[in-house]
Image (spheres, rainbow, N blue to C red):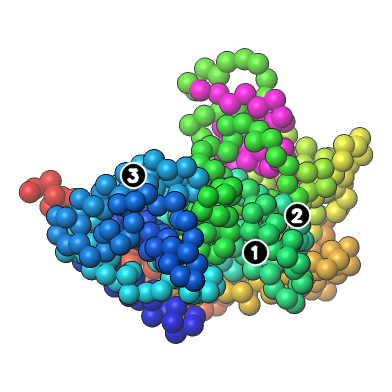
């Protein structure tokens, strides 16, 4: 990380402890930073050499607030948030329902002065983006807040983008985009001169027309908008690339060339989805999606169906799914069979444990290409890369890196995936890259795609246990999690006593 970026992240995050002492969570702090940095950047854009009409109403600019202290600062900040939330476009989307969560006026003053000293507009989008991404990661590390569920490991995102190889002038969707990680990785890939040389039209399309996002949680939605804006995606008063709401509610009408996404963890939805007329006795509200293959209350299965709808006729997808999507019966089996018939489900990456902020998650990435309607089975072979058996990471002591996924991306062969070679063989039973014909898959119980073949050393003798460093890291992480939970419980008990 560049020294300038690291230094600013340290400054921005240095006020976290006093804020925590004052009852402000990581997520609330990040939300307030979003508002304040946006205001400061708008102020910079209004001055030479930019002289832009930023749309900030008179009396509610950064200059109207940055010299105030105490109760006057609090009142002005409160009124500014309310006023800006009434505006249209991206401005109104970011500030809608915004409230001041920093009740300590002295700390609010320190945050304002810290932001005021930096020249945000003159920083490159790379630097600004890395600052915000750094803050998002720190927020995700706060396991108690649950923010990590919106944060997909960046090495995994980059590998998925590298495999899909999105092209300039084509559209990309993420129907549960979190803070926008997939979009940023796609942008980085598309602007890399080793991949493409973009024309002026390509750059404009990338900024304003490429991305279609959806996010259910309002605060995360705001962070996504700010994150994209800092990376030069979208325009303050133009088209908003991300919409707020439940992506599963309806067919949005658009069709895209690529979908890159990590649907939210958790099996059940509070709403079932049905593709036929009728009533759901167990649910108060039902999505009536005639475009879906089957009815399910499983969120991941519904997202698979939704993705099938929004993909163009030759669209391509890379989707993170939990293990149950690969083996669950009923609706799960129906959806797997439909995918095999209507799409070329050509690759599965079995992911290791210890890479997500939610403990115990067992997940995979499925890669598939949608095909025009045909009575023929579109999937011929499924290639599986077992990156889980005998592999384990931890978030702090042994995090997954880009290098860890290099062998997979080489096996995937993004340049021409029809030129693949297995690393597994009878002579090399521990090879991680293996091909299965669709006929083999269809013979399996429930058309299960939950396939392993490498011997699990943890089930063998003690001599085959993981390295002591890995075991120690696991123990430390579990103890730390237990201590965090205990401290949280003690704080709650003390609050009740008081």
* Image disc number at residue 83: 3
* Front in this rendered view, residue 345 or 116: 116
Is label 2 or label 3 in front? 3
Q: Residues within 10 Å of mark 3 (few under 14, many from 20)?
A: some
Which residue is identified by label 2? Answer: 170
Count of marks, rendered view: 3
Point 66% across, 38% down: residue: 306
**Sequence order check, earlier mark of 2 and 1:** 2
Q: What residue occupies the far bottom of the structure in this picture? A: 3
Q: Is residue 310 magenta?
A: yes
Residue 496 against residue 147 in the figure, above or below: above
Residue 439 at x, y percent in the picture: 87, 46
Say which residue appears at 83% left-offset and 74% top-offset.
427
Mark closer to the observer (1, 3): 3
- Residue 356 is left or right of residue 487, and the answer is right
Label 2 CA crowd tier, 10 Å (few <14, some 14–19, many 20+)? some
> Please, which residue is most extreme toward the top here?
278
- Disc 3, SS: helix
> Disc 2 and disc 3: Cα gap in Å?
37 Å
Instruction: Name which residue lies at 80% across and 54% down.
Output: 346
Instruction: Return the residue nearer the eye: 183 or 396.
Output: 183
In terms of secondary structure, where does tag 1 sit?
Answer: helix
Q: Is residue 211 left or right of residue 355?
A: right
Residue located beneath label 1 in the image: 187
Q: Position of residue 333 (x, y in %)?
A: 71, 37
Question: Is 451 in front, or is 129?
Answer: 129
Q: Which residues are magenta?
A: 285-311
Crowding at mark 1 (Cα within 10 Å: few <14, some 14-19, many 20+): many
């Amino acid at each position: 990380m560049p020294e300038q970026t690291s230094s600013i992240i340290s400054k921005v995050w240095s006020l976290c402890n006093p804020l925590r002492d004052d009852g402000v969570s990581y997520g609330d702090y990040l939300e307030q930073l979003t508002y304040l940095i946006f205001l400061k950047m708008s102020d910079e854009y209004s001055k030479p050499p930019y002289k832009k009409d930023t749309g900030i109403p008179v009396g509610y600019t950064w200059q109207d607030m940055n010299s105030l202290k105490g109760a006057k600062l609090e009142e002005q900040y409160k009124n500014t948030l309310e006023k800006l939330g009434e505006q249209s476009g991206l401005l109104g989307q970011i500030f809608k329902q915004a409230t001041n969560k920093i009740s300590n006026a002295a700390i609010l003053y320190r945050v304002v002065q810290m932001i005021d000293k930096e020249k945000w507009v003159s920083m490159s989008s790379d630097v600004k983006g890395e600052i915000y991404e750094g803050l998002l990661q720190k927020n995700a590390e706060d396991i108690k807040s649950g923010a990590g569920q919106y944060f997909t490991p960046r090495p995994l995102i980059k590998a998925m983008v590298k495999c899909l190889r999105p092209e300039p002038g084509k559209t990309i969707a993420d129907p549960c985009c979190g803070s926008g990680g997939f979009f940023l990785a796609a942008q980085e890939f598309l602007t890399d001169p080793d991949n493409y040389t973009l024309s002026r039209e390509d750059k404009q399309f990338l900024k304003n027309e490429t991305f279609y996002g959806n996010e259910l949680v309002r605060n995360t939605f705001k962070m996504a908008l700010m994150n994209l804006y800092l990376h030069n995606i979208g325009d303050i008063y133009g088209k908003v690339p991300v919409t707020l709401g439940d992506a599963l509610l309806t067919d949005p009408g658009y069709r895209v060339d690529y979908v890159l996404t990590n649907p939210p963890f958790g099996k059940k939805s509070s709403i079932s989805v049905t593709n036929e007329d009728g009533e759901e006795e167990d649910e108060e509200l039902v999505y009536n999606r005639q475009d879906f293959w089957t009815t399910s209350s499983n969120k991941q299965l519904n997202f698979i169906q939704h993705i099938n709808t929004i993909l163009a006729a030759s669209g391509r997808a890379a989707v993170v799914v939990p293990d149950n999507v690969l083996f669950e019966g009923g609706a799960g089996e129906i959806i797997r069979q439909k995918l095999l018939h209507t799409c070329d489900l050509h690759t599965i990456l079995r992911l290791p444990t210890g890479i997500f902020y939610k403990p115990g998650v067992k997940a995979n990435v499925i890669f598939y290409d949608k095909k025009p309607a045909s009575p023929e089975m579109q999937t011929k072979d499924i290639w599986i890369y077992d990156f889980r058996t005998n592999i384990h990471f931890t978030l702090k002591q042994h995090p997954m890196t880009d290098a860890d996924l290099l062998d997979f991306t080489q096996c995937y062969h993004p340049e021409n995936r029809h030129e693949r070679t297995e690393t597994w063989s009878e002579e090399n039973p521990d090879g991680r890259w293996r091909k299965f014909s669709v006929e083999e898959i269809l013979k399996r119980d429930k058309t299960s795609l939950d396939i392993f073949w490498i011997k699990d050393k943890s089930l063998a003798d003690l001599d085959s246990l993981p390295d002591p460093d890995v075991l120690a890291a696991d123990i430390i992480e579990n103890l730390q999690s237990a201590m965090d939970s205990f401290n949280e419980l003690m704080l709650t008990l003390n609050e009740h006593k008081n």
